[in-house]
Image (cartoon, helix red, strand yellow):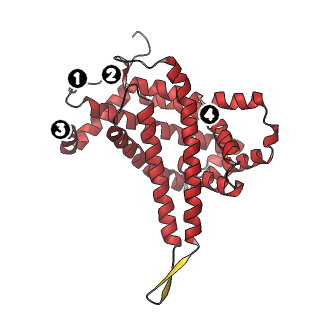
Amino acid sequence: MADALSEVLKSPGAFALRSLKAFRANQGLLLAGAVAYYALLSIVPLLILVVIVLSHWLEHALLLDTLERYLGWLFPGQAPPVVAELARFIEHQEVLGWVLLGTLIFFSSLAFTVLENAISIIFYHRVAVRRRHFLVSAILPYCYILFLGTGVLIAALAAGGLEALGTHSIDFLGRSWSLDPFSGVALYLLGLAGEILIISSVYLVMPVGRLSFRHALIGGAVAALLWEITRHFLLWYFARLSQINVVYGSLTTAIAVLLSLEIGATLLLFGAQVISEYERIGGPDAARAPKPMRTGRA
């Protein structure tokens, strides 16, 4: 393990280039497009399920504020209209019947199935040796939805406490110091830590076989760092340069959300590729160039 880390630190540029070549060979952008498309179909049903369940324990205002804050990390600049639709659904959730509930559960699991297949291609060296039982693959999305709902509940409670703390101040050296800056920094760090842990949990759960938490954390940190840079760029781009609302009109939110999901899925899969290449260091095929994935006979 130490030898692999020392090799990466010795030549990080070469490791990054090798990961990029392997990602390209695995048709990473094509896989990311499929994940983003099914994520777009799944995200609304998933959010509706989370809102329905958590609205029984949390105040609607606190729940929606928490979702808007953290959806802003996933959909830069587009969280308010998404949360507005969720708020309207809460007001009319009595229309939810068993058929609609089953439909929501089914569609909310689609993205996980596609993501599992995409990561299986990146971790082909694992799948070739060991395959996951189909029942595990069938149950896995719903267990993960439960995990995400629990995470949102914890984040909402923590965010509520930090926001309440920001309204207070302390007296020190004869001056009154507001805790609002501390609250803002703590909320950002909480969101960043949650982002890294959620991405790392994807790498722990999705690949076949047991992946070490250290490897998953490496991939999660890489993907989260790249996404943070991209997210701030998208916020700046949508606020200053983009004419997307002029071009797409009423479809603006859907197009912007799909673009964010496409970029996010690309970085998520690239983080998995980083883990895969890290695992190959010191192995028998470590020096072998990535073999491009073909979709048909040339």
Q: CA distance from mark 2 to mark 1?
A: 10 Å
Residue type highlighted by circle 3: Asp
- What's under tag 1, amino acid-wise? Asp
Answer yes or no: is residue 75 visible: no
Looking at marks 2 and 4 on the same chain, the residue that comes earlier in the sequence is marked by 4
Q: Secondary structure at mark 2?
A: helix
Label 1, secondary structure: give it.
Answer: loop
Measured as percent of width and height from the top left, residue 275 is found at: 33, 35
130 left or right of 177 in image: left
Q: Which mark is residue 285?
A: 1
Amino acid carrying mark 4 in the image: Ser
Residue labelled with disc 3: 3
Residue 42, disc: 4
Tell me if residue 115 comes above or below residue 188 in the rendering: above
Q: Is residue 288 visible?
A: yes
Q: Earlier in the sequence, mark 2 or mark 1?
A: 2
- Identify the residue under disc 2: 125
* Residue beneath the point at 59% across and 29% down: 109
Q: Is residue 262 left or right of residue 18?
A: right
Residue shown at 79% from the left, 32% from the top: 97
